[in-house]
Image (tube, grey):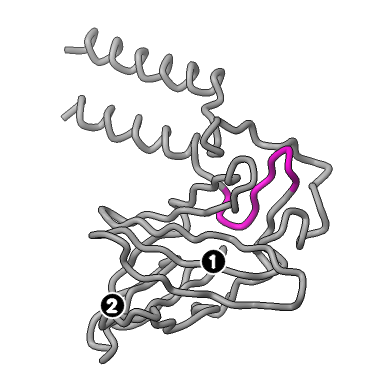
Amino acid sequence: MYWLTIATSFAILSLLIIADDPCRYQTEKGVIDISSLARTDDKAKYPDKAPATGSGYKYSYNPCKPFTELPSCQGVAACQVSTDGKYSFSIGKQDSAKWNSGGIGGSPTVTYTDGPKTLVVTLVCSKDGTDELEALGESSTNNYRMRLTNKCACWDGCGGGPQTTTKPQPTSKSGGVSFIGGTVFIVHLLIVNIVYSIGLIT
């Protein structure tokens, strides 16, 4: 039981360390801020989008903030809904958001997960007033794709540029947030101390 508690605590702390902000992403390229696209009334900004290929499902997405779509999607970033509306499935949670800068010449993406399901939303910069979400459907089992076109998908397109009170997040080669070495060391040290203390008690 002690070991289960320790393992659970370590997993939670690790998730907190590497969690990305689902609304805002800052690198040396600039800032992408999609917070202004979010609905805050528990509904999806882009509801019930059907893939062009037709699959028996439609998809809803709300950037930045969670929403609910009956019967089963509650507090989600994106939802897969049967065309008859009888079934709905979460395909990503806001607190799982992971950003990728797209590398050289590529488009940035934000990835969401919920259990085995993964959704990748590609952000397409448009400064002509376009505001469009394309649901591309399920590319392979439990893997979903969408394409969001908006000026807020541009670097420094929305949000007023970098915040002066924060520094750009360090990024790995894949574009995600890297571990903060000092914090990880402290967490590991705390875990070791807990294990040692339990050993003395037992």
Callout 2 amino acid: Ser
Q: Say whether residue 24 is magenta.
A: yes
Quadrant where the C terminus is found in the figure: top left
Give the residue at x 76% y 61%.
Answer: 157
**Above or below, comparing residue 84 to residue 177 in the picture:** below
Residue 184: percent from left, percent from top: 48, 22
**Above or below, comparing residue 68 to residue 16 in the picture:** below
From the viewer's perspective, tell me whether residue 58 is left or right of residue 181. Answer: left
Residue 168: percent from left, percent from top: 71, 37
Q: Say whether residue 8 is magenta.
A: no
Q: Quadrant of residue 141?
A: bottom left
Name the one closer to the observer, 84 or 147.
147
Residue most extreme to the bottom: 84
Residue 167: percent from left, percent from top: 74, 36
Q: Nearer the viewer, mark 2 or mark 1?
A: 2
Q: Quadrant of residue 53?
A: bottom left
Callout 1 amino acid: Lys
Quadrant where the N terminus is found in the figure: top left
Describe the element under mark 1 as helix, strand or loop: loop
From the viewer's perspective, tell me whether residue 100 is left or right of residue 76. Answer: right
**Number of the label disc, if any, that sits on residue 89:** none
Q: Where is mark 1, residue-wise?
A: 65
Mark 2, Cα crowd under 10 Å, few <14 / some 14-19 / many 20+, is many
Describe the element under mark 2 as helix, strand or loop: strand
Q: Earlier in the sequence, mark 2 or mark 1?
A: 1
Residue 186: percent from left, percent from top: 49, 18
Give the residue at x 65% y 64%.
Answer: 35
Give me the C-alpha separation between circle 2 and circle 1. 18 Å
**Above or below, comparing residue 19 to residue 120 in the picture:** above
Q: Where is mark 2, residue-wise?
A: 88
In the rendered structure, which segment of residues is drawn in magenta? 21-30
Mark 1, Cα crowd under 10 Å, few <14 / some 14-19 / many 20+, is many
